[in-house]
Image (cartoon, grey):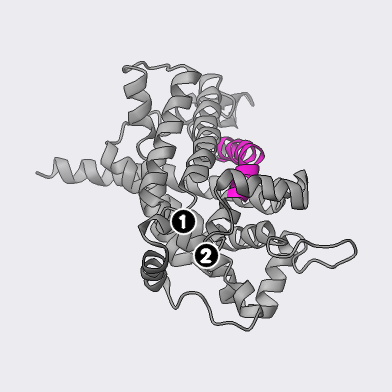
Amino acid sequence: EVGSSDFNPSVPVKIFSAGAAGCVSDLVTFPLDTAKVRLQIQGESEPLVRGQRATYRGVFGTMFTIVRTEGARGLYNGLLAGLHRQMSFASVRVGLYDATKQFYGRGSESPSIATRLAAGCTTGAMAVAVAQPTDVVKVRFQAQVRLLRGGAATRYGGTLDAYRTIARDEGLRGLWKGCLPNIARNAIVNCCETVTYDVIKERILQYELMVPCVPHAATMAFLCTPSVADNMPCHFTAAFGAGFCAAVAASPVDVIKTRYMNSAPGQYGGAIHCAFTMLLKEGPAAFYKGFMASFLRLGSWNIVMFMSYEQIKRGAARLHKSVQSSF
C-alpha cells in the first residue's frame, strides 16, 4: 500500500493528503518544470540550424537565462494553474490508488503487479479527465516568454483570464487540448511513479532493508527495530526510484504533450501528427529534449511529494482519529 503499514487512513484523508503534498512538491520544483517546458518547445517554430546557438542550454543554464531575461518570477509562470492542477490531479491519481488497487484485487493483501498497473492506469486517466484544463493553462503560461521576446502582447493577463480566453477562442475543446496524449503520458507516469513507489516500499519493508539499528552500550551489539522501518529513508529511496523510472518511460510522450498543448490552433492535426512532425524536422533526439530537467524535476518532485504525502497523511489520520474520539 502507498501508505503507512501501522494504520489505515480513510479514502478522504488520502485524497486530501495527496492534493496537499502535490502542492508542496510543486512549490519546491516548479522552476525545474518551467525549464523543462522551455527546453521541450525550443526549435518548435523555427528548427535550429547547424552552428546556431540555442537560447536555452541545459537545465540550470535555462533557469539562469529565464531569471536574467524575465526576472525570478519567470520561473513561476503558471504556478497558480499548477497548484489548481495538483489539488485535482494528485488527489485523484495518488489518493484513490489504494482504493482502486483493492477494488481490482478484490481485497487481496498482496495484489499482483498487473493489478497495481491497472489501478495506476485507471487513476492516472481519471486524474487527467478532471485536471486537463489546468494543465493546458499551466503549459501556456510557462511557454509565454516566446511571445514576450517577439514584442507581442502576452497571451493571457492572468490564470482566470487564460481559462476564459481559451474557452472563448478555442471552445471548451481547447481546455481539453492534448487530452489523449496526456492520458497516455499520465498512465505511464502514474504506473512508473505510484506502482514503482508501492513495490519498492513494500520490498524494503518486507525484507527489512532499512531497519534502524543502534549499538547497545553494554554488549556493543546492534539492536534493530523492524516496527519503525516505514521511515523517511524508506520513503526517500522508493520515491527516487519512482522518479527515475517515470522520467525514462514518459519523456517522449511528455514532449509531444507539451508541444501539442502549446501549439496554435491548426498547427497540428493531432498528437500523432505532432509526433511525426517532430521526428521529421528534428529527429528522434527531439523526444528526449529537456530529459535532464524532466529527470531532475520528476525525481525531486517524487521525493518531496511522497515524503510530504506520508507525513501529511499520518498527521491528518491522527487528527481525524482524535476528532472522532472526542465525540
Q: Is residue 68 above or below residue 208?
A: below
Q: Main secondary structure of the magenta part?
A: helix
Q: Is residue 302 above or below residue 38?
A: above
Left/right placement of residue 211 relative to residue 46 reads: left
Tell me, yes or no, whether the highlighted magenta stretch contains residue 322: no
Tell me, yes or no, whether the highlighted magenta stretch contains residue 255: yes
Q: In percent of the image, x 76 and y 61: which residue is there? A: 47
Mark 1 to mark 2 CA distance (whole Å): 9 Å
Helix, strand, or loop for circle 2? helix
Q: Position of residue 21 (x, y in %)?
A: 43, 50
Three-letter code for the amino acid on which mark 2 is drawn: Arg
Relative to the observer, which residue lies in front, 108 or 100? 100
Q: Position of residue 323 (x, y in %)?
A: 18, 46
Q: Residues within 10 Å of mark 1 (few under 14, many from 20)?
A: many
Q: Residues within 10 Å of mark 2 (few under 14, many from 20)?
A: many
Relative to the observer, which residue lies in front, 74 or 217? 74
| Residue of label 2 | 140
Q: Tell which residue pokes out farthest to the left in this image.
A: 327
Q: In percent of the image, x 43 and y 42: which residue is there? A: 310
Q: Quadrant of the N terminus?
A: top left
Q: Mark yes or no: residue 20 visible.
A: no
Left/right placement of residue 267 relative to residue 190 reads: right
Relative to the observer, which residue lies in front, 265 or 47? 265
Three-letter code for the amino acid on which mark 1 is drawn: Asp
| Residue of label 1 | 135
Q: Are marks 1 and 2 in contact (CB under 8 Å)?
A: no
Q: In percent of the image, x 38 and y 26: which residue is there? A: 101
Q: Mark yes or no: residue 44 visible.
A: yes
Please provide the residue range marked out in magenta. 236-256
Q: Earlier in the sequence, mark 1 or mark 2?
A: 1
Q: Is residue 295 above or below residue 209?
A: below
